[in-house]
Amino acid sequence: MSISGWAKTAEAWLMAHVPGADWLMLFGAAMVVVTGLALLIWFLRLAIGAIGTISTEGKARAARRRNAPGFRILISSPPKDRPAGKWLEAALSQYLPVFSFGAPFSLVPMGTMKGGLESRAIARARKRMATADADMFLWASRTGNGERGLELHCLSRGGGLTAAEARLFTLALPGSRKVRTDDLARAAAYLVTKQLQPALSDPQAFRAEKIRLLANDLDSLLAGEPAISASLRAEIEADFCASGVRVAEELGDVSALDKVIVMRRKHLETASEAADTGRVLQARLELGRALIVRAEKQFDQNVVREAITQLSQAVEGLRADPMILRAQSASDALFKAQSMIESRKRFSLNFGS
């Protein structure tokens, strides 16, 4: 019997002996259609994904071929919030030149990036960085409207690292679109620029005239009260204080000095000596230095005494630091070795060997 004949016989038997067989046949036909549509959608998604990957790789290669001067930054939008990617791109375009002292750069949009901090996503980001020879790859993930609703993930080669060595960091910003203000854009741009140029954390790395510009920009940023977490605000405040002290010491510009003194006193009041040892030491050092500059401008014995107290406590804290202790141990061992050589030389000269 042929297949078509067997199918007709089976259909006739089914219609004769199974109640509701016509509905079963309709259901089966519908399932075939649904399965076909599902397979079609699956193949379309695979095709779209493949096209997107090829397009992204093409953008990375094109960015490398352009050889544009300055920093090359790849940027991807969160999959479910393209406006966030546009906002971030606009923030960097406008404010990155401010905080990088006019350094040239180029932003290369790379579509969307899924996966957040999954290992596959990070590996994919490193690969694209290497393909584009980029200095930074920035992508985002949207988790809600809360304080950490928009997380910016970034790989940075700042400091001369390779793509494989690029540092990974995450900035947690509010997810609500209502708080994406100009002040938040400036804060995000500054924090990203710090990862691109790690030397921004050290005011001694730049000329005092540039640091004065940075201090003014950070002062304006903080005055705008951007909607950022307490930890990010504390980081920006610490950078402002370090810059303000440097400017006051080298240029004699004390316009930010009073704010630095108030901030550092507040930081010391709220900080935990045990939990934030490094920050407390830095706050004491900068407060002491700021008070000395203030006393130089207008002598006040109480101010000098407070400066001495803060600096003394900072020195005591540094003496207990393991790195300082190791350095002291190495220095003592070096001195001992040099003394042995000198003693041997004197013995040889006096008595022979």
Image (tube, helix red, strand yellow):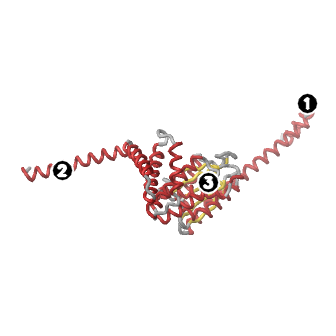
**N-term-proximal mark, 1 vs 2:** 1
Q: Are circles 1 and 3 on residues that touch, CB within 8 Å? A: no
Check disc 1 and report its element: helix, strand or loop.
helix
Q: Which residue lies at the image location 44% right of the left edge and 53% below the top edge?
A: 300
- The residue carrying mark 1 is 17
- The residue carrying mark 2 is 341
Q: Position of residue 154 (x, y in %)?
A: 57, 53
Q: Residue furthest left?
A: 351
Check disc 2 and report its element: helix, strand or loop.
helix
| Res. 85 image quadrant | bottom right
Q: Position of residue 115 (x, y in %)?
A: 63, 48
**From the viewer's perspective, is the residue at label 1 or at label 2 nearer?**
2
**N-term-proximal mark, 2 vs 3:** 3
**Mark 2 burial class by Cα count in 10 Å: few <14, some 14-19, many 20+:** few
Q: Are circles 1 and 2 on residues that touch, CB within 8 Å? A: no
27 lies above or below 337: above
Q: Position of residue 240 (x, y in %)?
A: 53, 56
**N-term-proximal mark, 1 vs 3:** 1
Query: Which labelled disc corresponds to residue 139?
Result: 3
Query: Which labelled disc corresponds to residue 188?
Result: none
Q: CA distance from mark 2 to mark 3?
A: 58 Å
Check disc 3 and report its element: helix, strand or loop.
strand
**From the viewer's perspective, is the residue at label 1 or at label 3 nearer?**
3
Tag 1: amino acid: His
Tag 2: amino acid: Ile
Q: CA distance from mark 1 to mark 2?
A: 109 Å
**Mark 1 burial class by Cα count in 10 Å: few <14, some 14-19, many 20+:** few
